[in-house]
Amino acid sequence: MKKEMKKILVTGSVGQIGSELTMELRNRYGAENVIATGRKTQPSEELKNSGPFHFINVNDINSIEEIVKKYDIDTVYHMAAILSAVGEKNPQLCWDVNMNGTINLLELGIKYEMARIIIPSSIAVWGAGVPLDNTPQESVLKPSTMYGVTKVCGELLCDYYVQRFGLDIRGLRYPGIISYETLPGGGTTDYAVAIYYEAVDKGEYTCFVKEDTRLPMMYMPDAIEGTIQLAEADFDKLIHHSDFNHAAMSFSVTDLADSIRKRIPDFKVGYEPDYRQAIADSWPNSIDDSAAQEEWGWKPKWDLDAMTDDMLKHLRERKEAGTLYR
Ligand code: SER
């Protein structure tokens, strides 16, 4: 197996995490070495103009293989996925994209002797039967959503390919990710992003989960830093591969609203819980990421108040420029 990382493919590069990850990878490794891909959504001007971009369908192995061959890809960040809320509306599509996309990339990893494949997992792997606070790395994985099922299966599949074929695969169980560049698409934790946009836009927000809903969360710069840090970690020091708990903070909607209210005193929040409440209730409040700390030195930088300051600063600037929702 090749052990260098020279040509990087990012799937899902138009998505919430993929868009910022691609730009950071281009900064670090050279724009021409990072090949961004998406399914249908048009890339931003920044993404399109800063390096190669192609449309592919991760369910169609030939469409990925064309790009892998064209650019001699040796590293993949596989960010394309259907998230939890959309997955519950269309479970078959969720299975199809999340599982077939993953196995297609793993097979190409073997065929082209790739150096490294990064495939994210999620807090959605958990369901009944785990302690909700500080959920341990090794715990029962009984998700209640199709998204969670695909993430558990994905972790198992990746670990199988590590053991059986010697592929170098790494993955993190992301908490809810909060960011201002690209809106998330169809997750349960999306409320923690939407609340900032609406606070800046209208001064009020109606939340689709109850005020005491508490979930593990992370600000985007930490998510990007952690992902690249894991990708660059020494393989021989890793005991885990595809399933690292990855934590930064944990807060309820009330905590989040209070943090915003310290900066926007008359901010109002209403509550109209919908089907996503049950999904949120099935996930932990907080998770224990000591394996990530011990095996590759993970340490988050952002807490709730620092994140709120930064989110509001950026979103206010965008509102003034008339590009809040772009
Ligand atoms: N943010 C994701 C979701 O809500 C969880 O990984 O679906």
Image (cartoon, helix red, strand yellow):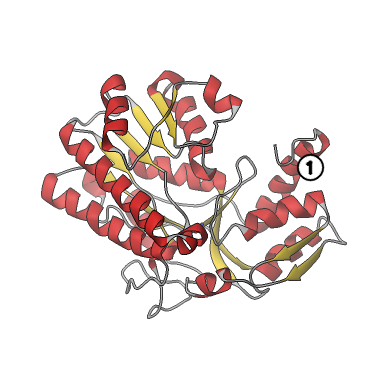
Q: Is residue 163 left or right of residue 89?
A: left
Secondary structure under tag 1 reads helix
Q: Is residue 311 above or below residue 88?
A: above
**Image x and y of residue 48, in percent:** 53, 24
Counting labels gives 1
Query: Which residue appears farthest toward the right when viewing the image?
Result: 266
Quadrant in which the C terminus is drawn: top right
Residue 153 lies in quadrant: bottom left
Q: Residue at x 61, y 56 (%)?
A: 303
70 shown above or below 229: above
Is residue 274 in sight in this rendering?
yes
Q: Of 170 and 249, which appears nearest the observer?
A: 170
Residue at (42% x, 79% y) in the render: 131
Instruction: Locate residue 25, reporting x and y percent.
Output: 45, 31
Closer to us: 281 or 300: 281
- Check disc 1 and report the residue beneath it: 316
Percent across and percent down for residue 239 are: 24, 55
- Quadrant for residue 69, please give it: top left
Q: Residue 295 at what x, y percent from top left? A: 32, 53
Residue extending farthest to the left is 164
State the residue at coordinates (35%, 57%).
Answer: 95
Q: Is residue 168 visible?
A: no
Q: Amino acid at mark 1?
A: Arg
